[in-house]
Image (cartoon, coloured by chain):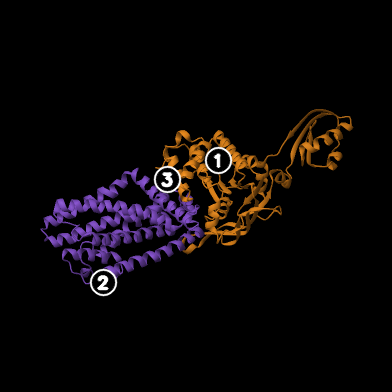
Chain colours: A purple, B orange
Amino acid sequence: MYSLNLQRALIQIWAFVIKNWIMTRRNVFSFFEILFWPVVGFFSVGLLTHFLKLDPNMGGFILVGIISMSVIQVCQIDVAEALLYDLWAKSMKHIFIAPVHPFHLIMGSWLIGMIRSMVVFLLLSIFSYFSFGYNFFKPGFFPIVLFLLGLFLTSASVGITVCILILVFGYKAEVAAWSLSSLMSLICGIYYPISILPFPLPEIARLIPLTYFLEYFRSFYAFEGNLRNILLWGFVLAVGYLFLEALLFKVVLQRARRTGILLKLSE
Amino acid sequence: MSLAIEADKIFKTFKSGWRGRKKKEALRGVSLKVKKGEIFGILGPNGAGKTTLLSILSTLLLPDHGQVKIFGFDGIHNGHKIRELVNISSGNANFLWSMTVRENLNFYGMLYGLIKKDRLKKIDSLIELFELQEYRDVPFDQLSTGLKQRLSLAKSLLNDPSLLFLDEPTVGLDPDVSARIREMILSIHKERGITVLLTTHNMKEAEHLCERIAFLKAGKIIAIGSPQELKRMVRIGDVIKIEYNGLILEDQLLHAEGVINFSISDNICEMIVDDGEKRLGSIISMISKNGTFIKNVNIGQTDLEDVFIEFAKGSDSDMGLCD
C-alpha cells in the first residue's frame, strides 16, 4: 500500500516536471529566461568589473552575486510556473479538481527549476572562467553543492510565495514572479555587503537565507563578513520558511476554495 | 435508494470590493439528491447559480453553510477522497495551449497517479472514443472549439469517474457538433453507468439527456422532477386544436377532465389540456356526441422551454414544487 502510494505520488510529482518541460521547450520566452537574460546580465556586469579594474577578489564578489541572482531567478520562476501556466491558460480548476497535493505541484516544478538553473550555473561559470578568469569551481565539490542547495531552497521559497500570492490576489500577483527576487537581491547584497545598507535593512537581510549563502560562497574569495554560523543559519532559515510556506499554501488553497478564486482564474 | 449526491441547505455568498463589502448571494438554501447512475440536469437562466452549485459539489468551492455528501463522503472534510471519484468537463474548455491533445491527456492522467502502461492505454482508448486520432499531436490552441470540447470530455474520463460534472458542455458549439457531443454523453453514460450532473440553459439538451431536472433561479431550486413531471407541475399542458362543423358546448368543455383552458372562434376550438395524447380520445367522443363533425385535429406538445419560461417568470419565492 505504502509503495503504491509512493509510486502514485512520484507520478503526480513527475506530471509537473513534464508540464514545465514541455511548456518551456515550446516557449521562446523560456529561452530568454534560461539563456539570454542571464548571459546578457552576466557579461554586462563582468565587463563593468573589467572596466573599473577591480581587484580579483572584488570582481569575484560581484560575479558570485550575478550568478546567484541568475540561478535564483530561473529556479523560482519554474516553481511559480506550477500555477502561472494554468493561470495564463485559465485551466486552474482542472489542477485542483484532481487529487493532487500542493507538495506534488511544488516539488515537480522545483525539480525542473533545479535542472534548468544548474545549466545556467554551469554555463555562467564556464563563461566566467574563459572570459574573466574567475574559477567558480575553486571552492570544491561540496561547497558548491551546499551553495547551490541553499540557492535552490531560497528559490523554492520565493516561487511558493508567488504561488501563494496568486491564490490570494489572482492575476494581480503575476508581477511578483519577476519582482520578488529582484527586491530580495537588493536587500541581500547581491553586489555589495549588507553592512553598507541603511538601518533596518541589514537586520532584514539577516532574516533572508540568501544573505548567508552568498556570504558562505564569497568566503572562498577572501571576503570576510560579519555573520557567524553562516551555513547553519542559512539552512535553518531556508527550511523553516519552506515549512511555514507549505502550511500557508494549504491554508491559502482552502481560502481560494472558499472565495471562489479558483473559479475566477479558470474563466 | 443509493445516492451519489446529497446536498442539504447550501448557501453561498460571494464577496468583493473593499473588505468584501459588496455581497452577492449565489445560492440560497439549495437541497437536492441525485441517485447513483442518474443523469441529472441543473437548468436555469444566466446568473442563477448553476456553476456555483456544480463547483461546490465538485469540491472546487466551499459552501458558507450547508452539507454536501458525495457517495457518502463529506464534501468539506473529505475533499481529497471525493476528487478521486469525480471529474469535470466545462464548455469553453481551457487547457495548456502549447501541449498537444496527447500531452494534455498524459499530464492530467498523471495527476490521477495512473501508471504509464495503464495511462497510455487509457489515453489511446479515449482518443479513439472521441475520434481525436488525427489531432493527437495537434497543440491545444490549434484545435477548433468542438475538438477542444471533445478533448475536455476525454480528459474528464481519465480517472474512470463515478460522478461526472458537465458544465454547459455544448455552449458555443455548432448545432451538429452539439448533437454529437450529446450523443457521446449518452453513450458514455449508457456504457459506464456513471452518474452525470450537468448544467445547461439549453432546454432541448436537458430534455434529451436528463432523467431529472432541477430548475434553479436566483440561487434557489424552484422545482425538481423529470421533464414530464415538470411539464405537469406548471400546468402549461398540451394544446389541442380542433377544426369542426356544428356545435361545441362550452359547458361540456368547462367540466371535461384534463381541460385547463379553451377558446372557440370561427369553428376552431383551441384547448389546453394536461396531457394531449391521454385526453384526445375522450374529447373527440364528447364533441362528436352532439353530432358535430370534426374536420381536423392537431396536438401541440409543450416543450421544456415553455416550462422554463413559466418558471423563470414566476416569483423568487418557492413554488412549493421541490421534492
Q: Residue at x 86, y 40 (%)?
A: B251
For the residues labelled 2 and 3, the Cα–Cα distance comes to 45 Å
Which image quadrant for residue A245?
Answer: bottom left
- The percent position of residue B250, horizontal first and vertical second, equals 84, 38
- The percent position of residue B70, horizontal first and vertical second, equals 60, 55
In screen coordinates, is B131 left or right of A186?
right
Mark 1 Cα shell of 10 Å, populated few (<14), some (14-19), many (≥20): many
Dot 3 corresponds to which residue? B96
> Are labels 1 and 2 on one chain?
no
Residue A183, can we see it?
no
Indicate the secondary structure of the residue bearing disc 3. Answer: loop
Find residue B323 and name its label.
none
Q: Residue at x 30, y 70 (%)?
A: A233
Dot 2 corresponds to which residue? A229
In screen coordinates, is A38 left or right of B301?
left
For the residues labelled 1 and 3, the Cα–Cα distance comes to 20 Å
Q: Nearer the viewer, mark 1 or mark 3?
A: 3
Dot 1 corresponds to which residue? B170
> Are labels 2 and 3 on one chain?
no
Q: Earlier in the sequence, mark 1 or mark 3?
A: 3
For the residues labelled 1 and 2, the Cα–Cα distance comes to 63 Å
Chain letter for mark 2, please. Answer: A
